[in-house]
Image: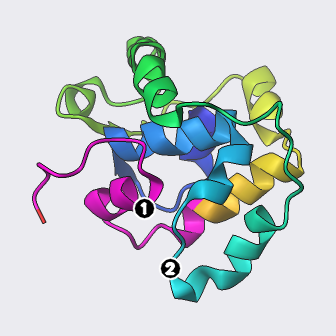
């Protein structure tokens, strides 16, 4: 999650948005199931042209995303306890990185990326314009029917 926060252009992000992007960072193969807007057709090609690997397919991505929630919240509470994200905003389901510097070893780990992670970061930046409800709708990972339009 720190890797995502360090690469995002937004200073504050909704909890569910970060959860969705964390899911795709964990399971990059699932990004091919996203409904891409037309203006992101180049980005869509990156994920659609990836060869299918039946061993990487999730049977129920929505259920997996829901099961990840407790781990993601625990990780965020841990980061808040160390002062790396704002704990007051976390209680309001907003994630904001604080000014506290990261240890050098952690910075080195976060700088390490592979092609799949870089593609997910491109995906995050490409979908940056989309509101949370729209992101939920296009990914199908989290419930959106009761969200405000």
Is residue 145 rendered magenta in the image? Answer: yes
120 is higher (above) or lower (below) than 74: below
Using the numbered discs, state the Cα–Cα distance from disc 2 to disc 1 in whole angstroms. 9 Å
Q: Which residues are drawn in magenta?
A: 124-148
Question: How far across and down, in percent of the image, does residue 69 sit?
Answer: 40, 22
Q: What residue is at 86 percent from the left and 42 percent from the top? A: 53
Front one among 9 and 31: 31
Residue at 40% x, 54% y is 11
Q: Secondary structure at mark 2?
A: loop
| Circle 1: element type | helix
* Residue 89 on the magenta segment: no
* Residue depicted at x 82% and y 37%: 54
Q: Residues within 10 Å of mark 2 (few under 14, many from 20)?
A: few
Picture quarter with the C terminus: bottom left
Residue occupying the far bottom of the picture? 39
The residue singled out by tag 2 in the image is 37
Residue located at (47% from left, 14% from top)? 71
User: Above or below — where is 39 with respect to 98?
Assistant: below
* 2 and 1 marks in contact (CB < 8 Å): yes
Please state the horizontal and vertical placement of residue 111, each as a whole percent of the image.
80, 41
Q: Position of residue 34 (x, y in %)?
A: 55, 60
Q: Is residue 108 left or right of residue 74?
A: right
Residue assigned mark 1: 138
Q: Is residue 72 visible?
A: no
């Amino acid at each position: 999650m720190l890797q995502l926060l360090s690469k995002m252009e937004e200073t504050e992000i909704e909890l569910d948005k970060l959860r969705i992007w964390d899911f795709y960072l964990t399971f990059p193969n699932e990004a091919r199931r996203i409904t891409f807007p037309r203006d992101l057709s180049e980005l869509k090609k990156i994920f659609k042209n990836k060869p299918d690997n039946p061993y990487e397919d999730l049977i129920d991505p929505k259920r997996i995303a829901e099961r990840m929630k407790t781990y993601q919240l625990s990780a965020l509470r841990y980061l808040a306890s160390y002062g790396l994200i704002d704990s007051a905003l976390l209680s309001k389901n907003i994630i904001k990185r604080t000014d506290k510097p990261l240890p050098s070893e952690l910075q080195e780990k976060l700088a390490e990326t592979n092609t799949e992670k870089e593609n997910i970061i491109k995906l995050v930046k490409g979908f940056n314009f989309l509101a949370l409800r729209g992101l939920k709708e296009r990914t199908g990972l989290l419930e959106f029917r009761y969200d405000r339009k």
